[in-house]
Amino acid sequence: MDKAAVFICLIAFTFINVDAWNTKPFPKDFKFGVATASYQIEGAWNEDGKGENIWDHLCHHGPFVVEHNQTGDIACDSYHKYKEDVAMLKDLGVSHYRFSISWSRLLPTGFADKVNKAGVQYYKNLIKELKANGIEPLVTLYHWDLPQPLQVLGGFLNDNFVDWFGDYAQLCFDLFGDDVSNWLTFNEPISICQQGYGNGRKAPLITSPGIGEYICGKTMMIAHARAWHIYDKEYRSKQKGSVGFVVDSSWYEPNSNKTADIEASEMKLQFVWGMYINPLINGDHSSILKKQIAKRSKQQGFKRSRLPEFTKEEQKYLKGTLDIIGLNHYSTSMVSAQKNPDPDAMGFYVDCEVNEWQADDWEKSGSDWLRVVPWGIRKLLKWIKVNFNNTKILITENGYSDNGEKDLKDDRRIHYVKSYLSNIRDAMDKDGVNVVGYTLWSLMDNFEWNRGYTEKFGLYHVDFNSRNRTRTKKKSADFYKKVIATRCLADKCAA
């Protein structure tokens, strides 16, 4: 790593005092919202012409990787209860609601030859209800639920995916673009590629570390650019909206001030941001990322890097195709440089040659991967600012899980949200980071993928044993409602 990169890292790692709450009000145009996703809340998995997606297929046919073999067949039943959901949003006072469209509900085969009218009407009804209540729809096109017929053809490993996604995105712009100004193409590439096509932990459970996962990543980047160019050329002048991309990222804190550990932190960040954001802003993977994977590939006897290169034409096509960065951030990890990296190992989690762990004294949540480390989000936001020209950032997910028991007095969630929001305000106020909004995960308890219904993030409790899927407000909902109304974390806001 060159000295300039190390210097940038040192800037990010300077001590940040997080003992005091930031009581300055958020700007008047700062947006507060909540988020959900189609498979996690809609249910109605085979109603009204909807096709099968990869999570339907996995949950019904196995291998059964979800706790207690639970499924999203009914979930929160939001397909039938969307008006009740919007009423909850209205009560909270949110400015925006982030939800995703089910590709299979619109296009049952995955292809644009057959449009499901009932699916179109569901989303038109939802969007209409939101707009009638003064809530801005923030729409994610892809939140992990690929149509199963497209997966049979290879999914993200098929070059034709770019055309399939482009057709789907264009249909959404056509159908909903007059009422939707802000679009997000893909949610969490690490969960999609590294866990779906690398270590095989999430649907479609393909195990191809260091090869399939990187092909998936390249395909996703070009598919995003396809959607962006379609919007930019055919819709932007009329609809005047934006097209963003959502990256999932922790902060990686160096274990010491040694150069090797600081470089290890930068390497981990580049394996996320250099792989999934740098191409959309600068047209290519970061040089640090390319050099690292090429080095290991050569050592392992490959004739070329396992990280697929973008052609000159692709680089030009990718560059500048990001209107806003969507950031999903939950927690932080400690990192150090590996002294004796495994020369034969392949994949996102080992190619970086970095040790990663969480400190024992960090507060635990209901998820084994989520420790409460609020100062991490400020450091991450500052790093993004320095590395990507202070590009506009929307926090698209941040939240706290409990262990699944019905706890309406969820003080630990309140503490988490308040702590993270305070650090976000510090990043804006003291570091000059261009954060335009915050989206809490989630509106209500829902299907949390491999954890099923055993892990709960909601502001509203959902009784999954009730046929009515009864929603009950938690204490955190009232807290968040007050924050939105006052735009402040304290009873008395600072001037």
Image: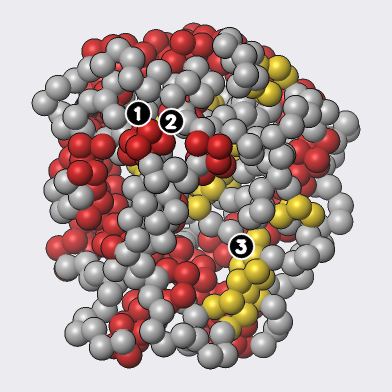
Residue 268 as seen in the image, left or right of residue 149:
right
Where is residue 313, by image quadrant? bottom left
Residue mark closest to the camera, 2 vs 1: 2
The residue tagged 1 is 102
Residue 339 in the image: state x and y as whole percent: 57, 90
The residue tagged 3 is 251
Where is residue 126, by image quadrant? top left
In the displayed structure, would residue 7 be above or below residue 412?
A: below
The residue tagged 2 is 39
Locate the C terminus by quadrant.
top right
Label 1 environment density (alpha carbons within 10 Å; few <14, some 14–19, many ≥20):
many
Residue at 55% from the left image edge and 41% from the top image edge: 67
* Amino acid at pointer 2: Tyr
Label 2 environment density (alpha carbons within 10 Å; few <14, some 14–19, many ≥20):
many
Residue 344 as seen in the image, left or right of residue 265:
left
- Which sits in the foreground, 481 or 461? 461
Residue at 33% from the left image edge and 20% from the top image edge: 46
Secondary structure of the residue carrying numbered label 2:
helix
